[in-house]
């Protein structure tokens, strides 16, 4: 059976980008068709300046939202990364497989290290090695597929390189995974800056739709979205990034083609209104279910406990095999 692994970092409140780029596929398709493993990747949240209490709170909120969006513990495994030691055990072996040059070429490292320096912080070593830990997350489970947004494709490519290299040097150990991107909205852009990706850790929040935003807040953010010069509604990412982003959002909500949708609009205002309504309706059930689950923290704890137990069982044989293959003496 196909194995799937993916995760979300508790670096901020989950966004519409996280939902459309990743979570929705996990819920609607992946958990039904494969052995699916989903993770709140909390160790990755420590790679940038962080507040301990906030990371703890956001980890619980992310898990609760993943359930609220429709992940079903009877169909998939849901857990918190730091509850399963296999991730960090394997990460070290992969650090011994990767080169520093490979890490420095990662676009996300370049972008986030600039941001950390601009805000006066130092760049944590773990920000550089982050993609190796992510590779360990994936390879520990022998995942065939990694459903992610477009921004993570480069990291999955690196994961493939590391798996192939390790297998060639030390013998067949890892499945070589591939990234699976959603057909539309694989890169949801910030509503106030449609040339940059919507990201939950960004400081400027007016262009970010959070899954837990109230309907009137969602409406206001979409209605105030930056659009482009001219008045024609066209699906053209280079010439019309703002309008194109709205068309992609509406397409993702309605299941229609963004190019065809464009033909039905003669003004930005009407497009914004329909997009706002569609996003509000898309998020409504998630927000309602989240409120219900918040009233039952013991249920969420139980899911995460069972999930971690299952994840450990799944990961341990592969990680143990990697320890043997690379030349470490087994403990007796
Ligand atoms: P951060 O700003 O801390 O990196 P993020 O919003 O990018 O947060 P991640 O936890 O890095 O979220 O990513 C979780 C998943 O959501 C990944 O699969 C990622 O590709 C996807 N994703 C993140 N942002 C977007 C976006 N704007 N559009 C589509 N998919 C996205
Ligand atoms: Mg990200």
Image (cartoon, grey):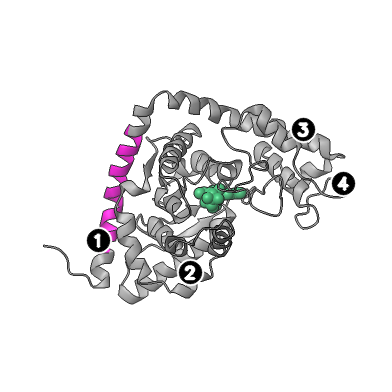
Residue labelled with disc 3: 273
Per the model, the C-alpha gap separating discs 4 and 3 is 16 Å
Q: Report whether the residue tagged 1 is closer than 8 Å to ligand 1.
A: no
- Mark whose residue sits in front, 4 or 2: 2
Q: Residue 103 got which mark?
A: 2
Residue at x-position 42% and y-position 23%: 295
Give the residues drawn in magenta, as a range: 302-321
Q: Nearer the viewer, residue 88 or 7?
A: 88
Residue 92 lies in what quarter of the image?
bottom left
Describe the element under mark 3 as helix, strand or loop.
helix
Residue at x-position 32% and y-position 33%: 302
Per the model, the C-alpha gap separating discs 4 and 2 is 42 Å
Residue 286, given in percent of the width and then of the height, sits at: 54, 30
- Main secondary structure along the magenta-highlighted residues: helix
| Mark 4, other Cα within 10 Å: few <14 / some 14–19 / many ≥20 | some
Marks 2 and 1 in Cβ contact (< 8 Å): no
- Residue 318, magenta (yes or no): yes
Residue 125, given in percent of the width and then of the height, sits at: 43, 64
Marks 2 and 3 in Cβ contact (< 8 Å): no
Residue at x-position 38% and y-position 36%: 73
Horizontal side, residue 262 vs residue 62: left or right: right
Residue 257 lies in what quarter of the image?
top right
Describe the element under mark 4 as helix, strand or loop.
loop
Residue labelled with disc 1: 320
- Residue 95, magenta (yes or no): no
Per the model, the C-alpha gap separating discs 2 and 3 is 43 Å
């Amino acid at each position: 059976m196909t194995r799937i692994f993916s995760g979300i970092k508790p670096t901020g409140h989950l966004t519409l980008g996280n939902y459309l780029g990743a979570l929705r596929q996990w819920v609607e398709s992946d958990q039904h068709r494969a052995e699916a493993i989903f993770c709140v990747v909390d160790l990755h949240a420590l790679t940038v300046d962080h507040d301990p209490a906030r990371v703890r709170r956001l980890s619980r909120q992310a898990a609760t939202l993943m359930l609220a969006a429709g992940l079903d513990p009877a169909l998939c495994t849901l857990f918190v990364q730091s509850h399963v030691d296999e991730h960090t055990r394997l990460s070290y072996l992969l650090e011994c497989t990767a080169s520093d040059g490979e890490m420095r070429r990662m676009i996300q490292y370049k972008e986030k290290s600039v941001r950390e320096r601009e805000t006066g912080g130092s760049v944590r070593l773990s920000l550089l090695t982050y993609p190796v830990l992510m590779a360990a997350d994936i390879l520990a489970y022998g995942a065939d597929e990694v459903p992610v947004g477009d921004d993570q494709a480069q990291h999955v490519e690196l994961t493939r390189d590391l798996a192939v290299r390790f297998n060639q040097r030390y013998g067949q150990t890892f499945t070589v995974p591939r990234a699976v991107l959603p057909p539309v909205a694989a890169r949801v852009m910030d509503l106030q800056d449609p040339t940059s990706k919507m990201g939950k850790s960004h400081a400027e929040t007016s262009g970010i739709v959070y899954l837990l935003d109230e309907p009137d807040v969602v409406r206001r953010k979409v209605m105030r979205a930056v659009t482009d010069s001219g008045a024609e509604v066209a699906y053209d990412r280079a010439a019309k990034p703002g309008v194109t982003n709205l068309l992609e959002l509406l397409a993702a909500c309605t299941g229609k083609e963004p190019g065809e949708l464009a033909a039905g609009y003669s003004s930005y205002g009407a497009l914004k209104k329909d997009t706002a309504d569609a996003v509000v309706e898309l998020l409504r059930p998630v927000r309602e279910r989240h409120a219900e689950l918040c009233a039952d923290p013991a249920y969420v704890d139980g899911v995460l406990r069972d999930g971690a137990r299952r994840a450990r069982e799944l990961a341990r044989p592969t990680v143990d095999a990697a320890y043997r293959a690379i030349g470490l003496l087994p403990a007796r």
